[in-house]
Image: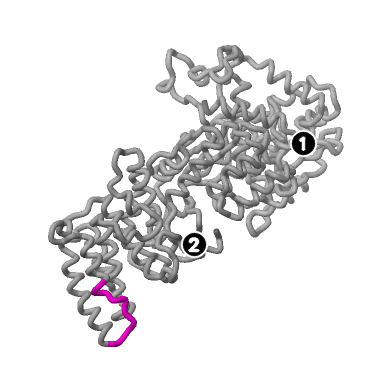
């Protein structure tokens, strides 16, 4: 399914004149230098091909992207590309101490090119052959043009040949002999699992580049490197027969999605690199998905990419602007602005696994359904804000950031949990239990620290607890917590865990009014035990509260009539008939936290504002 979808996407890209996608038999790679040759094969100069692009707030240099003859899959042996290689193959020099290392690779490069270029009747091919005959790897470093760029050349960038102002690999006669060579390669024919056609089967699939923490030389999505993984004595690609055409198509499309050329940028979740595309020629679907799902993950566009962005229809442009401003989204109108198209949409998560790539998740559904599920995720997270400037839409990054300690040196969320959360959002299924446990554990472990911006119970954590419980019980016959899984305070709810959370917030407020900020408040000392074992903790807290309330009265401070508030809350418990529970389950602990958050926020709700309305926000 993944290979088929990517192969179809390659066909879409190939029809798009602005995609600059590599045709069959070619690769799109970054090229660092061009070696300018004379007709006699003399190296005249070395031209840097770096381009300056804007990356965030700074300008960086990147190798120029070129369409060159298809690159071979590098292994531990010696294997040369055609007309585009690194310095070890083209110049015979390397930063390794072993001189033979570069000489052996230059000899392999020379044999391949003299054999192929002899078939091309053109001046460019003869110039390259002359260069190969006269070039001496042992004295290459002494050449003036090489010497002035030697440090950068040895970093491993690609080099190409230039002749009479043009690139040798673009010469029509040379392209013709290359394409004939590719078509005539020996390959076993078989039925392709992707297209169903009988065609030459790819022995090795091209490498994928741009996956975070994967092998920098490239990784494989499909590959067999040992007899233990083979079946019925089939070798390498024969175990999973994919035609050379299909293998080229799916890897080219995926490398395009992973590259900086793609205007709809990949983004990172944990250790997973995420790419996405619609089975449509319009890029606006992918752009809208990225903006709706998590605009903070999308890398900033470079100035060059902004200039090359294809002009879109005015209606589609308005949709993109609406999404980027994070306004309240009108989903029916969004789809109407997209002319009611509803193409198949794909989201693929890839994680590194040595020289291979693991598929963390693969979601494919109609675009409208994907968007509705994302919006459903945001609706489940809706809860009254603590402050007006907090985000209306809680992104996946906001959620994952709350699962790790702010004091950790390398604070990264569990990659498996991150992938499971992403999948749950896009499939409208319950959030992973690991997410809920991680949030509860952070609330237990953390102490409020304004200097490090740590808040034990905050907007995002409480929203996640609410959303987790909503999704967990949504498809069950009875939701025991339905009445409290709402945006703001429910003063009439009688669920013991929720009522006790409210009571703790009132007792905490009484202490704050009595003695102000202290090094260790009842929240620091007792919140975790009150949440887990309330029967043994609340009698202590209620006795303490009487001292705090007395102090407030003695000092004549403004009071909230704590005695009445405490009694009203205790009446909801019906303590005589239903005593305070000895223990709360994990789900009930989440409800306790929710009650605490709702009650604390209600203390600061503006007068005249209804309890079931969220605090107004300029961002909404």
Q: Main secondary structure of the magenta part?
A: loop
Q: Is residue 177 above or below residue 318?
A: above
How busy is the neighbourhood of tag 2: few (under 14 within 10 Å), some, or many (20 plus)?
A: some
Whole-number angstrom distance, CA of label 2 to CA of label 1 = 55 Å
Q: Residue at x 56, y 29 (%)?
A: 77
Q: Is residue 232 above or below residue 53?
A: above
Question: What numbered label is drawn on residue 390?
Answer: 2
Q: Residue at x 61, y 31 (%)?
A: 279
Is label 1 in a helix, a strand or a loop?
strand
Q: Quadrant of residue 538?
A: bottom left
Residue that lies at the very extreme toward the left in this rendered image: 576
Q: Residue at x 25, y 72 (%)?
A: 564
**Count of numbered marks:** 2
Q: Is residue 443 visible?
A: no
Residue 353 in the image: state x and y as whole percent: 45, 37
Q: Is residue 121 visible?
A: yes
Q: Which residue is mark 1?
A: 161
Task: Identify the mark nearer the N-term, 2 or 1.
Answer: 1
Q: Nearer the viewer, residue 447 or 326?
A: 326
| In this rendering, the label closer to the viewer, 2 or 1 | 2
Question: What numbered label is drawn on residue 375?
Answer: none
């Amino acid at each position: 399914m993944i290979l088929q979808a990517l192969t179809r996407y390659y066909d879409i890209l190939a029809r798009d004149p602005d995609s600059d996608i590599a045709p069959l038999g070619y690769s799109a790679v970054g090229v660092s230098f061009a070696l300018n040759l004379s007709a006699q094969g003399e190296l005249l100069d070395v031209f840097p091909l770096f381009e300056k692009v804007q990356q965030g707030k700074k300008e960086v240099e990147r190798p120029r992207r070129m369409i060159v003859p298809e690159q071979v899959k590098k292994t531990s042996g010696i294997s040369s590309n055609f007309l585009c290689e690194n310095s070890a193959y083209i110049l015979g020099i390397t930063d390794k101490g072993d001189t033979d290392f570069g000489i052996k690779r230059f000899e392999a490069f020379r044999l391949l090119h003299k054999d192929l270029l002899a078939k091309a009747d053109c001046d460019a091919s003869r110039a390259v052959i002359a260069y190969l005959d006269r070039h001496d790897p042992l004295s290459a470093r002494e050449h003036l043009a090489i010497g002035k760029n030697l440090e950068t050349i040895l970093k491993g960038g690609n080099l190409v040949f230039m002749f009479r102002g043009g690139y040798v690999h673009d010469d029509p006669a040379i392209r013709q002999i290359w394409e004939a060579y590719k078509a005539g390669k020996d390959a076993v024919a078989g039925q392709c699992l992707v297209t169903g056609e009988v065609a030459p089967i790819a022995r090795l699939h091209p490498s994928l580049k741009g996956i975070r923490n994967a092998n920098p030389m490239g990784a494989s999505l499909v590959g067999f490197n040992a007899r233990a993984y083979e079946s019925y004595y089939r070798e390498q690609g024969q175990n999973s027969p994919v035609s050379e055409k299909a293998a080229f198509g799916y890897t080219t499309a995926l490398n395009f999605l992973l590259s900086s050329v793609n205007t709809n940028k990949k983004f990172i979740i944990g250790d997973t690199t995420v790419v996405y595309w619609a089975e449509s020629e319009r890029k606006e679907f992918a752009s809208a998905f990225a903006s709706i799902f998590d605009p903070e993950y999308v890398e900033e566009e470079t100035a060059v990419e902004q200039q090359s962005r294809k002009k879109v229809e005015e209606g589609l442009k308005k949709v993109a602007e609406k999404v980027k401003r994070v306004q309240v989204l009108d989903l029916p109108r969004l789809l109407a602005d997209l002319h009611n198209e509803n193409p198949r949409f794909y989201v693929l998560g890839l994680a590194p696994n040595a020289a291979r790539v693991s598929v963390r998740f693969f979601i494919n559904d109609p675009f409208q359904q994907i968007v509705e599920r994302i919006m459903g995720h945001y609706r489940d997270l809706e809860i009254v804000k603590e402050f007006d400037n907090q985000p209306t839409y809680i992104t996946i990054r906001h959620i994952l950031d709350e699962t790790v300690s702010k004091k950790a040196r390398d604070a990264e969320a569990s990659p498996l949990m991150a992938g499971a959360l992403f999948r749950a959002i896009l499939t409208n299924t319950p959030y992973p239990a690991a997410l809920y446990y991680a949030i509860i554990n952070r609330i237990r472990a953390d102490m409020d620290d304004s200097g490090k911006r740590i808040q034990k119970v905050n907007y995002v954590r409480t929203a996640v607890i609410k959303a987790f419980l909503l999704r967990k019980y949504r498809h069950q016959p009875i939701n025991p917590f339905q009445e409290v899984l709402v945006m703001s305070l429910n003063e009439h709810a009688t669920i013991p865990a929720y009522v006790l959370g409210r009571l703790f917030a009132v007792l905490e407020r009484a202490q704050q009014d009595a003695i102000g900020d202290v090094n260790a408040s009842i929240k620091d000392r007792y919140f975790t035990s009150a949440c887990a074992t309330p029967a043994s903790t609340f009698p202590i807290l209620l006795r303490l509260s009487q001292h705090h309330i007395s102090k407030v009265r003695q000092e004549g401070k403004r009071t909230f009539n704590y005695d009445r508030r405490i009694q009203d809350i205790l009446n909801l418990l019906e303590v005589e008939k239903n005593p305070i529970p000895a223990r709360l389950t994990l789900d009930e602990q989440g409800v306790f936290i929710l009650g605490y958050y709702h009650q604390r926020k209600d203390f600061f709700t503006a007068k005249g504002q209804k309890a079931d309305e969220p605090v107004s926000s300029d961002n909404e």
